[in-house]
Amino acid sequence: MKCLAAEKGQGLVEYALILVMVAVVVIVILALLGPAIGAVFSNIVNTV
């Protein structure tokens, strides 16, 4: 029974690590593309 509890905890840690990695990737992408996306929205606002 103790083995099952340890595996459940391990699974939660793995899911948490995956979520952290996804969050880091999203933050990096937004940091790199943020100014470009801002420029696109500025052009749209200026033409409207």
Image (cartoon, rainbow, N blue to C red):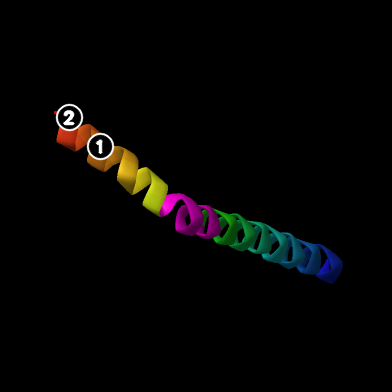
Which quarter of the figure has residue 28?
bottom right
Which quarter of the figure has residue 44?
top left
SS category of the residue bearing label 1:
helix
Figure quadrant of the C terminus:
top left
Figure quadrant of the N terminus:
bottom right
x%, y% of residue 36?
Answer: 40, 47
Q: Is 17 or 33 nearer to us in this picture?
A: 33
Q: Amino acid at mark 2?
A: Thr
Q: Which residues fall within the magenta stretch?
A: 27-34
Using the numbered discs, state the Cα–Cα distance from disc 1 to disc 2 in whole angstroms. 6 Å
Q: Amino acid at mark 1?
A: Asn
Q: Which residue is mark 2?
A: 47
x%, y% of residue 16?
Answer: 63, 62
Magenta span dominant secondary structure? helix
Q: Is 2 or 24 nearer to us in this picture?
A: 24
SS category of the residue bearing label 2:
helix
Q: Is 48 or 6 nearer to us in this picture?
A: 48
Contact? badges 1 and 2 (CB < 8 Å): yes
